[in-house]
Image: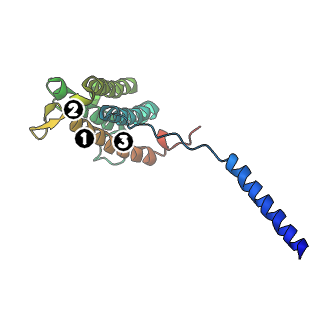
C-alpha cells in the first residue's frame, strides 16, 4: 500500500510541476484592440478598396476584349468601367459645387485601354481627395442628390457610390468568367 501511495504522490508532484511549467509558458495576453478608425477614414478605405479593384480589372483585362459583352443587350467591358467611374462624378461634382455630367462617358472619347484605365484611376483619386478634404465633420455637409433632387449628406452619397461601383465590379467579374478569364481578386495570392 505504501508503494501505491508513493506512486500517487509522485504522479501528483509531476502533474503539478507540468501545470506550473505550462502556466509559465502560456502565451502573452493579446494587447488591447486598436481603436476604431474615424468615419472619414473608414469611408476612404472602402472608397479606395473598390477603386483598387476596378482599376486592377481595367489594367488586367485584355485590350482586344475591351468591347466584349456577355450578351448583346449589355454594356461592353469598357463601357461598364466608364459608367462606374463616371458615376463617381455624380457624387464628386455636387460636393464641389460643380455641375454633374450629362450622362455616361462615351466609349468613343476613350478609344484605348490606357485612356479608360486613366479615367477610372482619376475618378477614384478625385473622390479620395474629396473625402480626405472633408474629414469627419465634412461628411455631414449637405449636397443635392442629382437623381432625387433631395438634400443628402456627403458621407451618405459617397457610401451610395461605393455600392454602385461594387455592383459594377460584380458584373465585371461575370464578364471575366464568361470570357474564360479569372478576375484579379479571385487569383491565388502570393
Residue located at (27% from left, 22% from top): 133
| Vertical side of 77 occupied by 133: above or below | above
Residue 43: percent from the left, percent from the top? 32, 35
For discs 2 and 3, the disc positioned in front in the rendered view: 2
Q: Residues within 10 Å of mark 2 (few under 14, many from 20)?
A: many
Label pair 1/3, CB-CB below 8 angstroms: no
Residue hosting label 1: 160
Residue hosting label 2: 91
**Secondary structure state at the residue bearing disc 1:** helix
Label pair 1/2, CB-CB below 8 angstroms: yes
Pointer 2 or 3: first along the chain: 2
Residue 51: percent from the left, percent from the top? 37, 33
Pointer 1 or 2: first along the chain: 2
Residue located at (28% from left, 41% from top): 164
Which residue is nearer to you in this view: 59 or 49? 49
Q: Quadrant of the N terminus?
A: bottom right
Residue 114 showing in the rendered view: yes
**Secondary structure state at the residue bearing disc 3:** helix
Residue 159: quarter of image: top left
Question: 81 left or right of 16?
Answer: left
> Marks 1 and 2, how far apart in space?
9 Å
Residue 7 marker:
none
> Marks 2 and 3, how far apart in space?
18 Å
Residue hosting label 3: 169
Amino acid at each position: 500500500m505504501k508503494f501505491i501511495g508513493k506512486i500517487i504522490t509522485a504522479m501528483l508532484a509531476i502533474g503539478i510541476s507540468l501545470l506550473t511549467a505550462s502556466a509559465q509558458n502560456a502565451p502573452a495576453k493579446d494587447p488591447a484592440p486598436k481603436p476604431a478608425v474615424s468615419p472619414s477614414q473608414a469611408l476612404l478605405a472602402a472608397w479606395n478598396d473598390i477603386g483598387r479593384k476596378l482599376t486592377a480589372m481595367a489594367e488586367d483585362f485584355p485590350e482586344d476584349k475591351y468591347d466584349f459583352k456577355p450578351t448583346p443587350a449589355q454594356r461592353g467591358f469598357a463601357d461598364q468601367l466608364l459608367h462606374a467611374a463616371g458615376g463617381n462624378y455624380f457624387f464628386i461634382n455636387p460636393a464641389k459645387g460643380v455641375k454633374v455630367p450629362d450622362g455616361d462617358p462615351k466609349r468613343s472619347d476613350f478609344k484605348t485601354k490606357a485612356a479608360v484605365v486613366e479615367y477610372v484611376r482619376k475618378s477614384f483619386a478625385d473622390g479620395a481627395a474629396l473625402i480626405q478634404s472633408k474629414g469627419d465633420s465634412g461628411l455631414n455637409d449637405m449636397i443635392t442628390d442629382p437623381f432625387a433632387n433631395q438634400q443628402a449628406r456627403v458621407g451618405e452619397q459617397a457610401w451610395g457610390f461605393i455600392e454602385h461601383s461594387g455592383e459594377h465590379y460584380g458584373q465585371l467579374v461575370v464578364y471575366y468568367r464568361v470570357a474564360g478569364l479569372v478576375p484579379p481578386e479571385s487569383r491565388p495570392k502570393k
